[in-house]
Image (tube, rainbow, N blue to C red):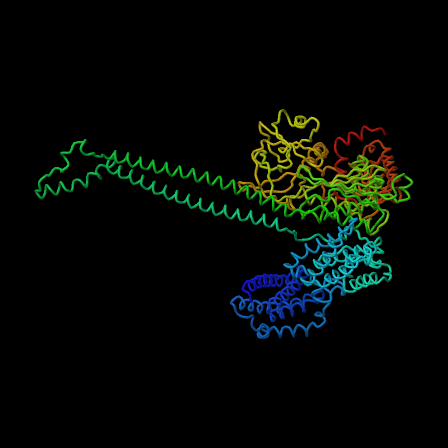
Amino acid sequence: MDPDLTETFLQDAASVLGALEDATVQLWLEEGRPGALRDLAVLSHRLRGTAALYGHPQTAALAGVLERLLEGRAGFGAEVTSALVGLLETAQLCLAAALTRLRAGQSEGDVGLDFSRRGGAAQLGALLRAYPQSFRPVAPDGEAEAASSGPEASVPFAQTQPDLWAFFAPEARELIETLRGQLAEDQPDLNAMFRAAHTLKGSAAMVGLAPLGQLGHTLEDLLGRVREEALALARAAQLLGAGLVLAERLLDQAEGSSPAAGAGALDGAALDATQLDGAVLDRYAAQVQALLSGQPTGAGVGAGAGAGVGAPDEAAAPLTRLIVRLDGEQLGALQQHVARLVTGRARLGTLLTQQRTLAEQLDEAHARIQQTIRDFEERHLNPTLGAAPAAGPQAAGDGGGAPDRAPRFADFSVLELDSYSDLNVLARSLTELSADLSEIRSQGRAHLAQLGDELTGLEKVTRALRGDVSRARLTRLGRATAPLHRWVRERGGLRLHVEGEDLQLDAATVPPLAQALLHLVTNAATHGLEPQDERTALGKPALGAVTVTARAEGGQLTVTVQDDGRGLPLAALRERALAAGHLSAAELAGLSAAQTAQLAFLPGLSTARSLTREAGRGVGMDAVRSAVEALGGEVRLDTRAGAGTTVTLALPLAQQIADVLVARVGGVRVALLVSQVQGLRPLEGDTAAAAGEGDPAAPGAVADLHALWGEVPGPRRSVARLSSAGGPVDVIADEFTQLEEVVLRPAGRLLAPLGYLAGTAVGAGGQALPVLNPSGLLAAARRPAAGAALRAANPGPRAQRRILVVDDSLSVRKHLGRILTRAGFEVLAAADGREALGRLLTGADPVDAVLTDLEMPHANGFEVIEGLRGHGPTAALPIVVMTTRTGEKQQRLALALGADDYFAKPADEGLLLRRLDALLAPAASRARAARPR
């Protein structure tokens, strides 16, 4: 076998074996056991397939034994799992030995014999004899047996063949979108459609997805007859659309995600995951053949589409791995950038070598000057050391009687022969060293200039590479809106118009955006648009219209979804919010119409009168907000009675590498995206004047970062105006220091609740940089008064406050007592209204507030309110009603009698404490005392 192929197999097999060992360890942990068993089954299947593909049958056979054993994992108890561990460990030892032999250039060896010698066969026999019922092949994790006819059906293709899936899936989805796009055209290109179906069939067959290949063949037959003009496209359109839905569902199933229930029904039956078997494909092929032969097709594919349209939250889960496709031109550009990077790296290496040579020359010069100075010191600073050598000949002459001979050059004059003193030698050495250092400095400057040029060039290459990589991740917005067209076609009853489908956005944004848009269009159709007869009576077109408009500007993608329906039912929203315990009656009464409309985003809130496949679960708008906020964006909603509702999604155009403006706030450094900065200016005057110093036509809210970070402002400050979906916001900092290119990272789960934080980055100095979100800063800037009011409303230590809980239910009294006691209140309890009035009107138990039910024996809640308000000492006592009766009639009466607030039971702890704190605030107490009795 080719050495490269062998190495590829060994790397993959080694990673699988390591994962098998890890999963086996997890079997000892009870909470991780189901996941570990599932992982073991998937990994065994993967190893069996790859070993067989690369020609190692005995390794594949042993992996197959493990896979077969794990088919019944759903029925494994703790005892069976413990007994299985020993067998798994033995098998892993045999597999590791086989890989070792292959790595050494040998064959895999007798893996089965090795397994038997290590006791594996005996372990297997004992296990099957002890637990025969546990190892019957049943569908794991509650899956339907029909969906699991073997390992290939139970383990998604994308997991068993990830490399094939990586290039096949994008191509297959692109071919399906090509077919769907052509089908929607007035003059479709039949040749292009036929080629797309043919390519889909061939590609699916090549990678081993036989069902999709069979479906592609059926589509090819159908399009072939249309292309030959033997069949009108209009007659085939419905079957073609249903076939494309089937193809998408097969891809979803191969990927391991859940197909959308009901999209494109067959004979009125919802097409869910359990029905994607051979029978469905055979039935579809039979209906196509019936159409081609001129026979009636019965109910027809998609006949029941209206009844089978699934709710958006049942749609396929988004891809867990981003897959993008590059054309040859893009790939060539990336390769050129990489080549330039390699060349630049080589030149930088040469410069580094030259710098090292200069460093060696500096070391030599330093050694020379040290030697010169040392010699000079020996002659003049330590004369005894310099005289000692000269005394030797003189002493010898004295002792030996040798004649004193004058030097032969003594008779030369200074003009005939130069003589050098020690100072001359030192001066010349220093001159030479100075020349050497000047040369080294000149070379160093030249090298630094070259290094600067190389860094500039490298910066240009990295910026170009960054741009090309970012563009490679882009895809058309049409990928996110394509499900909308399909959903509207299948459902009917409305018109959909989409603008801006050619806009480019990051591929990772498409799945969550598509889900959000599908929720919004569904809500518009089910909640916003009136029935056709009602619209006709109102003078509107019979078919309601939903318009989706997208535009990109200022580094932001803005998508609006607008309908021409009745608008949001604000009264119903208030009623449902009260009944769900999100807000109290007093809080709801203080909301404006625009604020009331935002209640639609609360979780679990729905204005639908009954539960249907499309509405009534209260997850739509909450899911939209969650998806958009996860992308770092925001949602705005505007509604007008009788005119419709507009929802605006504002999303940052995704970028992993960005230019940021660094700001200093006291001792903290933060970053702003350059694409969002509209201008900079020094701050003149106080913070309140900052908003008026910019463009008078567009005053912005002011966000002082010093207050946000708890830093002391400096003597001089600056202002940056940022753009956001909600309008401009002026950000105050001590100074804006520099521009940096950084890698953006998500804020993470811990920091995600901080709305003003878009993410984090690492600065050039290695320090963490918080990257600010203008929309979050705008929201924070618009509620400073609310924060101050909340601080002012703090009643002080709750231990000083006594609350009387009046309810005939002992469990409710105990539950509320625990909540209030845990919050620091002192709690008293009364079993009914008569007991409460007796204790309060006599003054025996003075309290600071009363929390009462309505329906109680002896005296109900209305009587309690009336009695307390008619008694002087308790006339200003805060009274809160908490009841299961959330109708408007009960609310009006309780508030008219003098209740301060009213909310639904069971009480949300946060709502209860928030309202009690507000009612017990000094300002609220004074207002109650001053009101007329």
Task: Tell me residue 548's x, y (percent).
Answer: 77, 42
Quarter placement of the N terminus: bottom right
Q: Is residue 891 left or right of residue 459?
A: right
Image location of residue 72, percent across then percent down: 71, 67
Q: Residue at x 63, y 24 (%)?
A: 685
For the residue pair 111 and 351, the one nearer the viewer reads as 351
Looking at the picture, does residue 19 appear above or below residue 485? below
Q: Residue at x 22, y 39 (%)?
A: 385
From this viewpoint, which residue is outermost toward the top? 685
Q: Nearer the viewer, residue 561 or 210?
A: 210
Left or right: 311 as drawn, with respect to 711: right
Give percent across and percent down for residue 116.
59, 74
915 or 205, which is in the foreground? 205
* Left or right of 309 in this view: 385: left
Residue 131 is drawn in which quadrant?
A: bottom right
Query: Is residue 341 visible to the viewer in this orientation of the structure?
Result: yes
Does 30 sit above or below residue 404? below
Q: Is residue 912 visible?
A: no
Location of the C terminus by quadrant is top right
Residue in view at x 56 percent, y 44 percent: 462
Please provide percent x and percent y for residue 89: 60, 67
Reply above or below: 590 against 155.
above
